[in-house]
Amino acid sequence: MAITLADAKLNTQDDVDLTVIDEFRKSSWLLDNMQFDDVVNPSGGGATLTYGYTRLVTERSAAFRPLNTEYGTEQAKRTRATVDLSVMGGAFEIDRVLSNLGPAASNEVTFQMNQTIKSAKAFFADQAINGTINSSTSTGFEGLSKVLTGSGTEYKQGADWSAPANESVAHNALDAVDEFLGLLDDTPSALLGNKKTIARIRSLARRAGYYSRSENAFGQTIESYNGIPLVDLGAKAGSADPVIGIDSKTGATDLYAVRLGLDAFHGVSTVGSNLVRQWLPDFSMAGAVKRGEVELGPVAVALKATKSAAVWRGIKVNPATP
């Protein structure tokens, strides 16, 4: 069985929980659209939060068979992979005197909750792309950048998008985009990049007539290239640096294409998981300073088929610096 944050919303009755889930959904296209395979069961002595699966790394072909001959043998190739689930989020402390200052929409509790949600969703996006396992704390999981390194869907064709393009250049650039997308096993669910990369694709798509806009369930505008959503993953938690960075010397960055699904790129969670949980400060109890928390997880990401995700390395979006 798979769940999404929208499903998690249906399973909670608490108004604050509903608001927190909606904030995660509104502020993260990835979290709003990703399915989570809720199958990890950590019950029992010595249990772990490990999800094991088989990843398809090489597909097989097919051929004609002349009569009275046999097919040549060929095998698709798989590899075993595991990922450990981790919890992520943050905590804050508020003095009871500050808790009710200002209008309800901007008081300190609301402000700190929203900022913690913002950092948690940014951290998840960062880990989904750049994640590595922290051996000293036994937390974290491998993101797409590491998983796709050296794979058949790591695309390294040079591209220079650092200057505005005319119509001819735009068509040539989009030919390269289509070649990149052709590495995948099906139409991707989204193109994931940073603000600069998404702006360049938007500009190219407009010139070639492949740009479109639509609204999601929250009334937010979703931009698309040829029907494929363009998603800016934003900045890392607590930083102005983009999740998908730009080399300060070369001006180069990466672009990711992902197909979401339980047979492709998806999230992993525990059985019966609420995915998102929150604890508000309890000012009814004695003590001047109270603690609040927001938590996502335990979660991880899994790539079931190498060809369901691709990365284009080295797209130049800024002029090189000497």
Image (spheres, grey):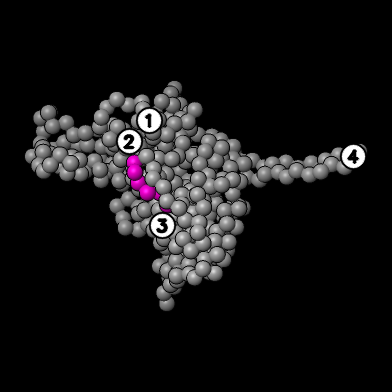
Given the image, on which type of amino acid does mark 3 rest?
A: Asn
Q: Tally the marks.
A: 4
Residue 115 to residue 18: above or below? below
Question: Contact, CB < 8 Å: mark 4 with mark 3?
Answer: no
Dot label at residue 21? 2
Q: Earlier in the sequence, mark 2 or mark 1?
A: 1
Q: Which region of the structure is painted magenta? A: 218-223
Residue at image location 12% in from the left, 28% down from the top: 285
Residue at image location 59% in from the left, 40% down from the top: 55
Residue at image location 51% in from the left, 68% down from the top: 167
Residue 42: % across, % down: 44, 27
Given the image, on which type of amino acid does mark 2 rest?
A: Ile
Question: Contact, CB < 8 Å: mark 3 with mark 2?
Answer: no
Using the rendered image of the protein, determine whether residue 208 is visible from the camera's viewpoint: yes
Determine if the magenta segment contains residue 186: no
Give the secondary structure at mark 4.
loop
Q: Which residue was labeled with disc 1?
A: 8
- The image quarter containing residue 157 is bottom right
Given residues 16 and 284, the one toward you in this image is 16
Residue 176: % across, % down: 57, 61
Given residues 33 and 273, the one toward you in this image is 33
Residue at image location 36% in from the left, 53% down from the top: 234
Q: Label 1: how many residues lie within 10 Å, few (<14), some (14-19) or many (20+)?
A: some
Alpha-carbon distance for marks 3 and 2?
24 Å
Q: Which residue was labeled with disc 4?
A: 67
Given the image, on which type of amino acid does mark 4 rest?
A: Leu
Alpha-carbon distance for marks 1 and 4?
55 Å
Q: Label 2: how many residues lie within 10 Å, few (<14), some (14-19) or many (20+)?
A: many
